[in-house]
Image: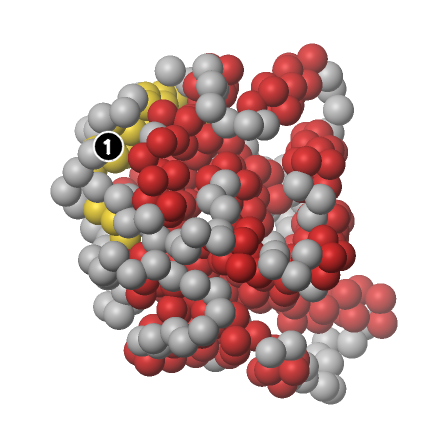
Amino acid sequence: MPLMEEIEALEKISYKEEIKQFKQDCFRTDRDLYDLILESLKMLWVKKYEKSEAYRIFEISKDFEKILFKDPRYRDHFIHQFQVFLSGLPVIDKQYDSIVDVYSKKFDDQSEVNIEFSWLLAASYHDNGYLVQKFDKWLDSFFTEFLDIKQLPVQIDLYHLLITRNFQEYIDKLTSLYSCLNNNSSKKWQYEGYHKINNHIRKLFTSKIINERNHGMISSLILLDRIEHSKISAMDPNYKKRLFSSVVLPAGLSICLHDKGIFTDPEIKPIEFKKDPISFLLIFCDTIQEWGRPIGPDGSDYELTNPQLSEYYITKDKVSATITYDKIITYNTNTGEKTNFDYKADEITSVLSKLKSSKPKFEITLQSLDKDNEISDFSRTCLR
C-alpha cells in the first residue's frame, strides 16, 4: 500500500484529520510544497500544541534552504523532515497501545505520555541543526557573493556559545534517559533528582557536538532549549516534571541518536523497538525517506537520482518498505565504480544492524526498474 493510502487509514492519531487535510491539499492545489508543509507545521506546532517559539525555526529553515543548496552536495532537509514524520504515523497508529505502554512504564506518575506529540517533535525537527552544522559554508558563500571575501578573518567559538546556554545539563539528562530506557530495570525516570550518568555516553554526546558539530545533537539541544524557555513552560511550574520530562526529552533523545555518527558508535547498543520505539522509528523512517528530496545547486535536480517508496506494508506484525530506483547511476570512487543502488544497500545494511525488533519485524527492500542496468532485488531485516 502506498504511504498516502496508509495516511488515509489512520485511526488513533489525535491529529489525523489535519494530516489527511495536508494530503488533500497536495493533490488539489498547485501551491508550493514548502508553503504547504510550513502551513501544516504551524497548524500542529502552534495551534494544537502551542509551541510557537520552537516552530519559529521552521520558518528560518525554509528560507535558508536556498542558501544551503549552494553546496552542490547538499540535499533538502525541510521536505525530508516532514516526509519522515508522515512515514512514521501509520506505524505508530498500528502499534499505538504498545508504544504508549513502553513509555508509561518508564516515567513517574507525574509525567504525561503523549506519543504522537513526541513523534511530531522528533521527526519534524530532527534535521533543523543543519543550519548550525553548515553555518561556516553558507556564511562563506554569503560574504563571497556580497563582498567578494573568500575567507572570513574570524572564527565562531561554538563550544563557548553552547556552554553559556547550559546545554551540558541537557546532555546529562539525555544520557540518563538513554540509560533508563535501555536497561531492564523497573525503576522509573524522573526529571529532577539524582541521575546515574554513563560517562562513555556523556563523552560521546559532548564530543559529537563540540568536535564534529553533529546536526542531530544540535537539533536536539535547540528543541529542548526552545521549549523549556517557552511561555507555556514558564506559566506551568510543573511543566518539566510532566510534558517536558516524558514527551519532549524522549523526542530530544531520538533526535540526537538518529545520526549514524552516533547510533553506529560502539558505545551505543542496538536500539530496540520495545525499549525506545521513537528513536527506533526515527532512524528507520529517516533511512527509507529518499523520494522527493531536491538536490543540486538550485534545488531542482532530483528526478533521476531519487528512488520512490513504491510499497509500504504495515501491520501489527510487520513493517515492510520497498524502495524503487527508476534510474541506476554509476559513480567513480577511489575504490572503483559504485552505483546509487549500492550506496543505499550499504546504508540499509549498516542501519538495520543497529536496530532490533522481533515484533513487529522491520524490513527494507531495494528494487531497480532500470532496464539498462539489471540489478537483483536487495532485502534486509532488522535484528530479531
User: What number of labels is visible?
Assistant: 1
Does any portion of residue 348 appear in the rendered image? no
Q: Judge whether 178 appears above or below 28 on screen.
A: below
The kind of secondary structure element at disc 1 is: loop
Q: Is residue 269 left or right of residue 48?
A: left
- The quadrant in which the N terminus is found is top left
Residue 55, percent from left and from top: 70, 48
Residue 30, percent from left and from top: 73, 19
Q: Residues within 10 Å of mark 1 (few under 14, many from 20)?
A: some
The one nearer the camera, 31 or 334, is 31
Q: Quadrant of residue 93?
A: top left
Q: Residue at left 31%, top 65%?
A: 179
Residue 103, percent from left and from top: 37, 47
Color encoding of the figure: secondary structure
Q: Residue at left 29%, top 22%?
A: 315
Does any portion of residue 175 appear in the rendered image? yes
Give the residue furthest to the right. 147
Q: Judge whether 167 appears above or below 246 on screen.
A: below
Q: Judge whether 7 appears above or below 158 on screen.
A: above
Residue 73, percent from left and from top: 53, 54
Residue identifier under label 1: 360
- The quadrant in which the C terminus is found is top left
Q: Quadrant of residue 256?
A: bottom left
